[in-house]
Amino acid sequence: MKKLLTFGALFLGLTYSAAAQKMASCCAKPAGNSGATATEAFAMLGTDKDFSRGHDAPLPYGYQGEGAMVEFKTPDGSTGKGFEIKSATPSNKYLFVIHEYWGLNDYIKKEAATFAAEMPGVNVIAVDLYDGKIATTAEDAGKYMSEVKTERAVAILKGAQAYAGPKAQFASVGWCFGGGWSLQEALLGGKQTVGCVMYYGMPEKDVAKLKTLNTDVLGIFAAQDKWITPEVAAQFKKDMAAAGKKVTVESYDADHAFANPSNPKFNQEFAAKAHGQALTYLRTKFKVKA
């Protein structure tokens, strides 16, 4: 495996406790909040104590490499943040990396750097949906995730798209919390969207919305996942078919955190294979040579 992957290029994902089985799926609407969107419903799981206890804090890691934090205007009158690694040559190709439970930490920056190194000619922006908050404990991570509001997250993603420009091509990749938002990013990008990778993320269930996708989707799932279950993945395939869109579902006989080397459920073989599939897909979409 490439040395770049050793410290977390494929670390991303979350571990979940057996208490997760209480929910029908990650997309279930919380009691007393029947109007919640799918993304809000999942974010609210951050307040569940069993959910928080099921997450091991990431191993200490400090990123030292290329890239810089950037700010951009958001349509709600505020500003958004991201970690950008620009292409060595001018390019209108942008990969948006969407963080998971812990926020835009150094592991995410390393992941962004890995994709940038593997796809010359593509700008990479790791978008911050936590507005600068980074968690080091499961309790804080759950709090930050539960505080994410759809309207604000959408504004941040739209701001990042505007920062890239009207002629840019977009693709996205994310894990769990970020996997669901990777799909939302693809929806928001409209005709500028050329690709979408979601690792065990929350699928969009609204077929009418899925019909607006301008790309196919690569979905990477875990057969032992207690939250994004095989049933959830199967329903996503049905919904995409109903929308007339293509989805490629790759399922691994592993748990939800199989792509996270800082987690005891990490599966090095499966993580490397999944990353290879994601990279091949993105290279194809951006028309980048290996």
Image (tube, rainbow, N blue to C red):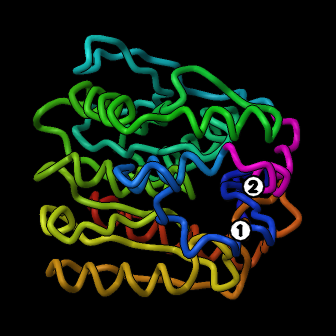
Q: Determine whether the residue tagged by mark 2 lies in a helix, strand or loop.
A: helix
| Disc 1 packing (10 Å; few <14; some 14–19; many ≥20) | some
Work out whether 41 lies above or below 17: above
Q: Amino acid at mark 2?
A: Phe
Q: Nearer the viewer, residue 35 or 10?
A: 35
Q: Are marks 1 and 2 in contact (CB under 8 Å)?
A: yes
Which residue in the protein does label 2 denote? 51
Q: CA distance from mark 1 to mark 2?
A: 7 Å
| Residue furthest front in the image | 32
Of the numbered discs in the image, which one, if any, rests on residue 20? Answer: 1
Left or right of 116? Residue 284 is left
Work out whether 170 lies above or below 243: above
Left or right of 48? Residue 36 is left
Q: Amino acid at mark 1?
A: Ala
Q: Main secondary structure of the magenta part?
A: loop
Residue 14 sits in quarter: bottom right
**Total number of numbered labels?**
2
Q: Determine whether the residue tagged by mark 1 lies in a helix, strand or loop.
A: helix
* Quarter of the figure that contains the N terminus: bottom right
Which badge, 1 or 2, is on the more N-terminal residue?
1
Residue drawn at x 57%, y 41% as measured from the top left = 113
Where is residue 21 drawn, in percent x and y? 70, 75
Residue 62 sits in quarter: top right
Left or right of 82? Residue 140 is right
Work out whether 9 lies above or below 195: above
Range of magenta residues: 47-61
Where is residue 192 drawn, in percent x and y? 15, 48
Residue drawn at x 84%, y 59% as measured from the top left = 263
Where is residue 159 drawn, in percent x and y? 28, 26
Left or right of 251? Residue 245 is left
Residue drawn at x 50%, y 35% as measured from the top left = 148
Residue drawn at x 54%, y 29% as measured from the top left = 130
